[in-house]
């Protein structure tokens, strides 16, 4: 790839709207969920996957289930993505927090990793 093309792709990447929204780590066997929000869902899901693989996840029950069932028993999903708004002062974080509350209300406490 030539230098000009690489520079153009890098600039486009830096200017792109990040994948912000709500994500889940789903135990496919039990149906239990970890639901979270992030300004970068791709990065958040990668972080959870890496922590689980390294045996260092902060949620002990999720880590235990991962050890017992294996990686193939889990799905990493984006549940809802935010769209870029024209208003420069739009509060994306507040919208994600409201969405997170709504998603968590849908999941019974016994089915959630907390």
Image (cartoon, rainbow, N blue to C red):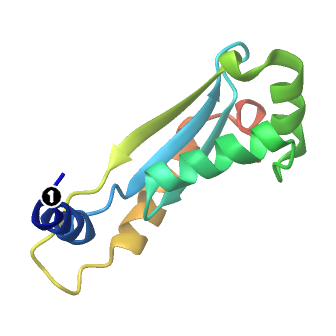
- Residue 21 locus on image (x, y percent): 39, 54
Q: Is residue 98 above or below residue 57?
A: below
* Residue 4, above or below 77: below
Q: Position of residue 59 (x, y in %)?
A: 83, 48
Which picture quadrant has residue 2?
A: bottom left
| Between 24 and 69, the one nearer to me in the picture | 69
Residue drawn at the location 13% of the way across and 80% of the way down:
87
Instruction: Give SS at disc 1.
Output: loop
Relative vertical location of residue 32 with respect to residue 28 in this rendering, above or below: below
| Residue shown at the point (19%, 61%) measured from the top left | 6
Outermost front residue: 2
Along the line of sight, the residue nearer the viewer: 44 or 30: 44
The location of residue 113, given as percent across then percent down, is 75, 40
Determine whether, in the image, residue 57 is placed left or right of residue 112.
right
Where 1 sits versus 17, above or below? above
| Neighbours of disc 1 within 10 Å: few (<14), some (14-19), many (20+) | few
| Residue at 81% over, 36% down | 62
Using the rendered view, name the quadrant where residue 18 is placed. Answer: bottom left
Q: Residue most toward the top? A: 29
Coordinates of residue 43 in the picture (x, y in percent): 51, 54
Q: How many marks?
A: 1
Is 31 on the left or on the right of 24, as rendered?
right
The residue positioned farthest toward the bottom in the image shown: 89
The residue identified by callout 1 is 2
Q: Is residue 57 left or right of residue 32?
A: right
Residue at the spot 51% in from the left edge and 57% down from the top edge: 37
* Foreground of the two, 13 or 44: 13
């Amino acid at each position: 790839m030539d230098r000009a093309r690489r520079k153009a792709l890098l600039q486009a990447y830096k200017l792109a709207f990040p994948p912000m929204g709500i994500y889940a780590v789903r135990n496919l066997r039990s149906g239990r969920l970890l639901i979270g929000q992030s300004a970068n869902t791709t990065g958040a899901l990668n972080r959870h996957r890496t922590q689980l693989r390294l045996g260092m996840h902060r949620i002990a029950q999720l880590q235990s289930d991962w050890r017992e069932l294996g990686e193939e028993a889990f799905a990493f999903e984006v549940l809802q993505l935010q769209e870029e708004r024209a208003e420069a002062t739009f509060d994306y974080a507040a919208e994600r927090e409201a969405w997170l509350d709504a998603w968590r209300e849908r999941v019974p406490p016994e089915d959630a990793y907390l």
